Image: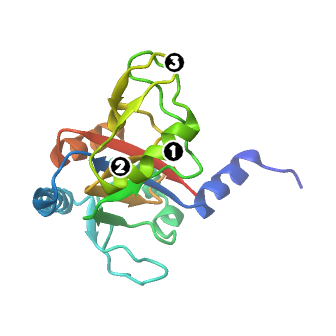
């Protein structure tokens, strides 16, 4: 019996927990529900999501699941075993929260000079950001201070009052994610979480 690397990698993706999260950084609390409702209605109308008919607190806790046209924006959902993964639904986050890549975390580059952030210093802003306004973050290399959310990277964290979370959707079209972000507000980011 030979070891199939591709099959093992595919299996590893199926049993791990992943999420792709579109988070908006600047929406004030009074506007959260309206923006999320508009995005939810758009996704329902486009048949990207549908009400979760198999909702279960442990196995399928999300209110929404992949709709009949989800495969158009997330091709892996064409495979039945991907659709049947535990917790592969869609959640709409309506509270101030940290959206963190967990095991995927990499310090983001400075928007001015491109040097990666000091990991410890970057992590220290989390609590301040969660508890209050978005803090500035200073680059240890060039000294320039920039809003924390302007340190953009695929595997960094952001804090916001609203987000759309795709649980165990392993690959989503970036243009589609951008359309969601633009509907959420002007300062949106994408977090790729793996745990």
* Number of other residues with Cα within 10 Å of mark 1, as a class: few under 14, some 14 to 19, many 20 or more: few
- The quadrant of the rendering that contains the N terminus is bottom right
Residue 66 visible? The answer is no
Mark 3 residue crowding within 10 angstroms, few (<14) / some (14–19) / many (20+): some
x, y (%) of residue 15?
A: 62, 63
- Circle nearer the N terminus (3, 2): 2
What is the C-alpha distance between the residues marked 1 and 2?
A: 10 Å
The numbered mark at residue 44 is none
Q: Is residue 103 left or right of residue 7?
A: left
Q: Give the residue pinned by disc 2.
A: 129
SS at mark 2 in the image: helix
Which residue carries the number 3 mark? 141
Name the residue located 42 percent from the left edge and 84 percent from the top edge: 56
Q: Position of residue 2 (x, y in %)?
A: 87, 51
Residue at the farthest right position: 1
- Gap between marks 3 and 1, in whole Å? 17 Å
**Mark 3 and mark 1 residues within 8 Å of each other at the beta carbon:** no
Is there CB contact under 8 Å for labels 1 and 2? no
């Amino acid at each position: 019996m030979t070891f199939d690397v591709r099959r093992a990698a595919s299996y590893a993706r199926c049993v791990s927990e992943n999420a792709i999260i579109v988070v908006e950084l600047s929406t004030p609390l009074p506007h959260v529900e309206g923006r999320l409702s508009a995005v939810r209605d758009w996704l329902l109308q486009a048949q990207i999501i549908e009400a979760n008919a198999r909702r279960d607190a442990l196995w399928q806790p999300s209110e929404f699941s992949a709709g009949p046209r989800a495969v158009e924006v997330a091709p892996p959902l064409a495979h039945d075993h991907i659709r049947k993964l535990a917790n592969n639904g869609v959640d709409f986050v309506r509270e101030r929260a940290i959206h963190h890549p967990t095991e995927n975390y990499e310090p983001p580059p400075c928007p001015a000079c491109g040097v990666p952030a000091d990991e410890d210093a970057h992590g220290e802003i989390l609590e301040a950001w969660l508890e209050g306004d978005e803090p500035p973050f200073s680059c240890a290399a060039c000294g320039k201070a920039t809003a924390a959310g302007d340190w953009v990277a695929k595997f960094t964290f952001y804090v916001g009052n609203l987000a759309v979370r795709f649980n165990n959707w392993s690959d989503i079209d970036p243009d589609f994610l951008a359309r969601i972000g633009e509907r959420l507000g002007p300062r949106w980011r994408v977090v790729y979480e793996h745990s």
